[in-house]
Image (cartoon, rainbow, N blue to C red):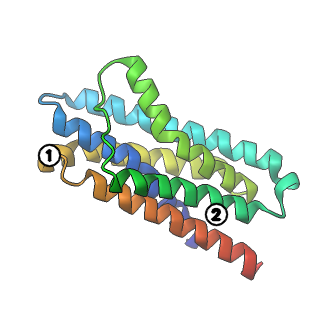
Amino acid sequence: MNEFLSVLLVSIGLAMDSFSVSIATASEITKIKLRQILYISAYIGFFHWLMSFIGGYSGLFLTDILKKVDHWLALIILVVLGSKMIYEAITNKKRRALLFNSSVLFVLALATSIDAFGVGLSYGFFNKSIFLTSAIIGTVAFLFSYLGFFIGKLFKGMLKNKMQLIGGLILIGIGIKIFIDHSFIN
């Protein structure tokens, strides 16, 4: 159960980018259909699954080579990704709203899921269940993206930076936990 909770927290941290994009989009678009919200959320969730899956299998192949430094790499990857999210939240970096155009949606889904590749890579180093981990990451990204549209309509963009800040802190915390677990416990 502890491992599931860890994966769930990492998934929530990763989903904060998608969540904030959905909130920003919903606060800027006057009319959006439920079918469009489901499509966009599924697209984002799929990319999170795909990127973490690819990262996980890449990590498996690199495990023997990087075994002695894997906890350092996980720490660095998660702290860098978390710091990037915190920086964007603090500097109030403006995100472009999703447009209902397949090329813009592709770029946005890819951009919000790049972090999932790095997390998948670190899970691959530790030989975790990549398919299950990726499925959780993709599902949480879908749910948070979906939820973000509705929250964005309710709060008109007031929460987006706070959620991104929380997501960054979660990723940094998980990176530190992995480092401590593998440095001092194993």
Residue closest to the eye, 54 or 164: 164
Residue at image position (74%, 76%) is 183
Q: Quadrant of residue 32?
A: top left
Residue 42 seen in the figure: yes
Residue closest to the eye, 28 or 139: 28
Using the image, determine if residue 185 lies above or below residue 84. Answer: below
Query: Relative to 36, is 6 on the left or the right?
Result: right
Amino acid type, label 1: Lys
Residue 158 coordinates in the image, percent (x, y) = 18, 52
Q: Residues within 10 Å of mark 1 (few under 14, many from 20)?
A: some
Residue at image position (49%, 58%) is 83
Q: Check disc 1 and report the residue beneath it.
A: 156
Mark 2 to mark 1 CA distance (whole Å): 35 Å
Residue at image position (52%, 69%) is 173
- Quadrant location of the C terminus in the rendered image: bottom right
User: For numbered disc 1, what is the local secondary structure?
Assistant: loop
Residue 26 coordinates in the image, percent (x, y) = 20, 37
User: For numbered disc 2, what is the local secondary structure?
Assistant: helix
Q: Give the mark, 2 or 1, whose residue is nearer the N terminus.
A: 2
Using the image, determine if residue 35 lies above or below residue 150. Answer: above
Q: Check disc 2 and report the residue beneath it.
A: 75
Looking at the rendered structure, the number of numbered marks drawn on it comes to: 2
Q: Residues within 10 Å of mark 2 (few under 14, many from 20)?
A: many
Please identify the residue farthest to the front as the structure is shown.
Answer: 91
Amino acid type, label 2: Leu
Residue 98 coordinates in the image, percent (x, y) = 30, 29
- Quadrant location of the N terminus in the rendered image: bottom right
Residue at image position (43%, 53%) is 85
Query: Relative to 85, is 36 on the left or the right?
Result: left
Q: Are marks 2 and 1 in contact (CB under 8 Å)?
A: no
